[in-house]
Each structure stands twice: as C-alpha cells, then as structure tokens.
Image: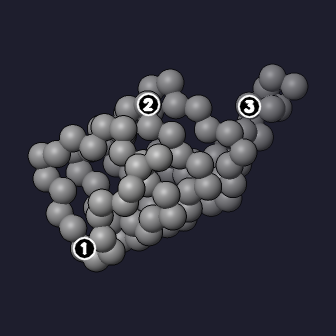
Amino acid sequence: MMDPTIESGKHLAEHVALTGTRFHDVCLGEAEFEDVNLGRAKFDNVNLSGAHFTNINMTDVEITNVNTSGMRIEGILIEDLLQAYKQQNG
C-alpha cells in the first residue's frame, strides 16, 4: 500500500511517468488528458458519463458489466449495434 503524495487541488503533470500509480477515491472531473498512455490500465467503478474520446486506440480492450445507454461509436448507438449483432448471430 502506498501513502498519498498528491494533495487536493489543481495540478499539472507534464512529461512524467506515473507507471504503477494507484488512484483511489479520486475526482478527475473536467480533467483533460492529451497524449496519455493508459496501456494495460485497469478501471473499476468509474463514471465516464458525458466523457468524449477522440483518436483512441482500443485494440484488445475488454468492457464488461457496463451501462451503454446513449453511448455512440462513430455516431452509432451501441444498443443498436448489439441488437443487430444478436439478430444476425442469434
């Protein structure tokens, strides 16, 4: 277990490596991430409602137990994609 080292408030992390860092009970609302590597990161109990993702590499990403209401990929509702898949693959 690690002791907290970042205090509440606004911070700028630029050109840093946070590999192995653990975020617990952290609010990153309205945070901006640009040129960020989250490869092999794990997310649990995360609220991404209203988030926008562009230029994202999601190769081999696995998403389970997720609420996709209103979620779109390339403008297509996920619910519609899943329904079409189920109809085609029974």
Residue 8, quarter of picture? bottom left
Residue that mark 2 sits on: 40
Residue that mark 3 sits on: 85
Question: Which residue is rendered at x = 69% and y = 54% of the image?
Answer: 67
Q: Could you tell which of marks 3 and 2 lies nearer the N-terminus?
A: 2
Question: Which residue is rendered at x = 36% and y = 45% of the image?
Answer: 21
Above or below for 20 versus 3: above
Count numbered badges in the picture.
3
Q: Residue furthest right?
A: 90
Residue that mark 1 sits on: 10
Relative image position of residue 59 (x, y in whole percent):
45, 26
Q: Could you tell which of marks 1 and 3 lies nearer the N-terminus?
A: 1
> Given the image, on which type of amino acid does mark 2 rest?
Arg
Q: Tag 2's secondary structure?
A: loop
- Labels 1, 3: front one: 1
84 with respect to 60 (left or right):
right
Spatial CA span between label 1 and label 3? 43 Å
Q: Tag 1's secondary structure?
A: loop
> Given the image, on which type of amino acid does mark 1 rest?
Lys
* The C terminus sits in image quarter: top right
Above or below for 72 versus 51: above
Looking at this view, is 19 or 54 the one in front? 19
Question: Which residue is rendered at x = 82% and y = 32% of the image?
Answer: 87
Q: Looking at the image, can residue 48 be seen?
A: no
45 with respect to 84 (left or right):
left
Residue 11, quarter of picture? bottom left
Question: Which residue is rendered at x = 16% and y = 45% of the image?
Answer: 16
